[in-house]
Image (spheres, helix red, strand yellow):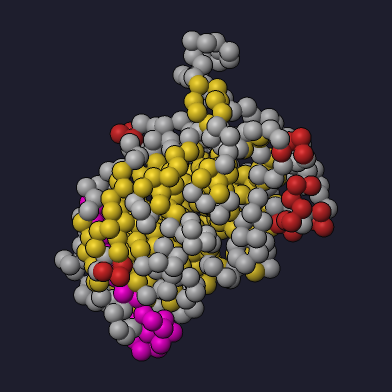
Amino acid sequence: MVNPPNPTAEEHDPDALDLAEVAEIIPDDDEEDHPMESDDDGDDGMGDEDVEMTVSNDSSAYFDGHSSSIFSISAHPSNPSLFLTGGGDDVAYIWTSAAANATDAAVTPRECRMIRKLEAHKDSVSATAFTAPNGEFAVTGGLDGQLQLFSAAAAWKRVDSAQEVEEIVWIASHPTEPLIAVGTNEGSVWLYDVDNNALNIRHVLYSHTASCTAGTFTKSGALLCTVSEDGSFYAWDTNSGQSVVALTAQDQRFAIEGGLYSVAVSPSGAVAAVGGASGEIRVVGLPVDAAAAVAGGKRTAARPQAGGGGSTGGGQAGQIIAAISTHSESVESLSFHPSVPLLASGSVDGKIGLYDAARGYAVRKMLEGHVDSVVKVEFVAGLGPQDGWMLTSCGIDGTLRRWDARAGVEVACLKGHLGGNGSEGEGGILGFVQTKERIITAGDDAVSLVFEVEGSAATATTAGASR
C-alpha cells in the first residue's frame, strides 16, 4: 500500500529553496516550539526544584523537534548548515543550524529552525542520507521497510517511495553520484539510482544470510563493502553488481564469534577493516582495480564463492592482512585516518583503539575516557598539520570527545546530552556528523546538539541547561 502524500502546509516557490539561502526558508505552519525539556516519569512539574536537573551544556545550538530517540543524522554535502535526522517518533526532519538574524546568533544555546517535517513512515526512521553530489534529494529508511525520497526542488516534499523489504538497517550515499545503498534486516543489499525524481533499482545483492549490519562505499565509489550478523564480508563492484571479495565465517581465520557489526575502508581503497561482536577486528585486502577484478572472474551477484580468499583481484585482494584482538566487547565503529596510516576502533567496552597500519596494525594506543559504550569514532578530515590528528568519539555516557591521536590524549570533552543506561542499551549519543568547524549529534534524549569547535578546542560557551 502506498502511503498518502507528505502533508503540505504552506506552498513554497521552488526558486526560493536555494540551499545556499536556507535561512530564508519558511517552515511549515504546524511547526511548534519545543523547549529543551525532559520529563521524568511523566511528571510535568515545570519549575519544581525537586525534579529539575541541571546538566552541563557546551553546545552552541540545539534542535529538539523529535519526541523520541534520534537514530540517524546526515549532513548536507554542499550546505554546511543543513541536516537530516530520523527518529523513533516515525518522522524525519530537515533543519538548519544557521541563525535567522543577528539577534538569534547572539543567543547561546539557540534553537535551530525546522525546514521540513518528513512524515511518511509508520515505524522508526532508522536511516537517512542526502544524495551526492549536491544534496538534491533526501532519503529516509524505516523499520517499516519503506524507503522514501524527498526533493529539494519540490520544497523537500516526497516524490517517490519503495517497499521491498521488512526493515531497513542503514543507508549509504555514493561519494560522487546520486546512488544509494540500502542494507536490510534479512541480509539483502539494494542499490538505487536516483534519477528524474525516482528510485530506480540498479542491483539487488543477496549473499548475506542474516541482517546486513553495516556498509560503506570506497572513496572512489567503485566498490561497496558490506558486513553481516552471519559473519560474512563482501566487496561489490557498484557498476556490475558482482562480488570481487567474499569472506565468511566458514574460513576460521576470518571467523569472529557473534558476527560483524562495523566496516571501514582506507582512503586509498586498498584495504577494509571489519569489527565483530566478540571485540575482534580483521583487515582485508581489496582489489586495486575493481573493474579488472570483475573482468577476470566468473562470479555472479547472487551467490559468489565464499570462504578462503574469495577474490578475483590481484595482489592482496581477499587476503586477511591483520587479525586484531584488543577489545573485550563488540567493535561498534571503525575509522581510517584520511592521510596517515592509522586505524581507530570504538567498542562497547568503552575503549578506543589506535593501530599503526604501516607496522602490521600494531597497537599504538588504547584510549580510555568514556565510562560506557563507545558508539562511533571518526577522524576529522580537512584539518591542517597542527590539528591533523584529531579523532572524535561519542558514547552512551552522553559525552562527545576529541582526542589527539598522535599524542594519545583527550583534548576536549563536550557535554549537553543526558547519559544513558548502557546495560539496557539506551541513552547517550547515538551518532554524529562533523566538519572542521562543528560537530552535530544525534541523541537518545531526542535532542540534536551543535558544538562549535576549532581544531582541538571547543569554542562554545559552557552553560548550565535545565532539562
Residue 186 appears in the rendering: no
- Residue 428's place in the image compared with 295, above or below, is above
**Which residue is depicted at the point 62% across and 56% down?**
76
| Side (left or right) of 327 relative to 428 | left
Q: Nearer the viewer, residue 204 or 320?
A: 320
Residue 356 appears in the rendering: yes
Q: Is residue 296 magenta?
A: yes
**Which residue is depicted at the point 56% across and 25% down?**
465
Q: Nearer the viewer, residue 373 or 7?
A: 373
The quarter of the rendered structure image containing the C terminus is top right
- Toward the front, the furthest residue is 386
Q: Nearer the viewer, residue 447 or 246?
A: 447
**Which residue is depicted at the point 56% across and 28% down?**
463
**Which residue is depicted at the point 50% across and 67% down?**
191
Q: Which percent across, then down, holds residue 223?
A: 44, 73
Kindly indicate the quadrant of the structure image that contains residue 359: bottom left
Q: Which percent across, then down, holds residue 137?
A: 64, 59
Kindly indicate the quadrant of the structure image that contains residue 357: bottom left
| Side (left or right) of 234 relative to 281 | right
- Residue 341's place in the image compared with 129, above or below, is below
Which segment is the magenta one? 275-299
Q: Is residue 444 magenta?
A: no
Q: Which percent across, then down, holds residue 1?
A: 58, 51
Q: Which percent across, then down, holds residue 231?
A: 27, 60
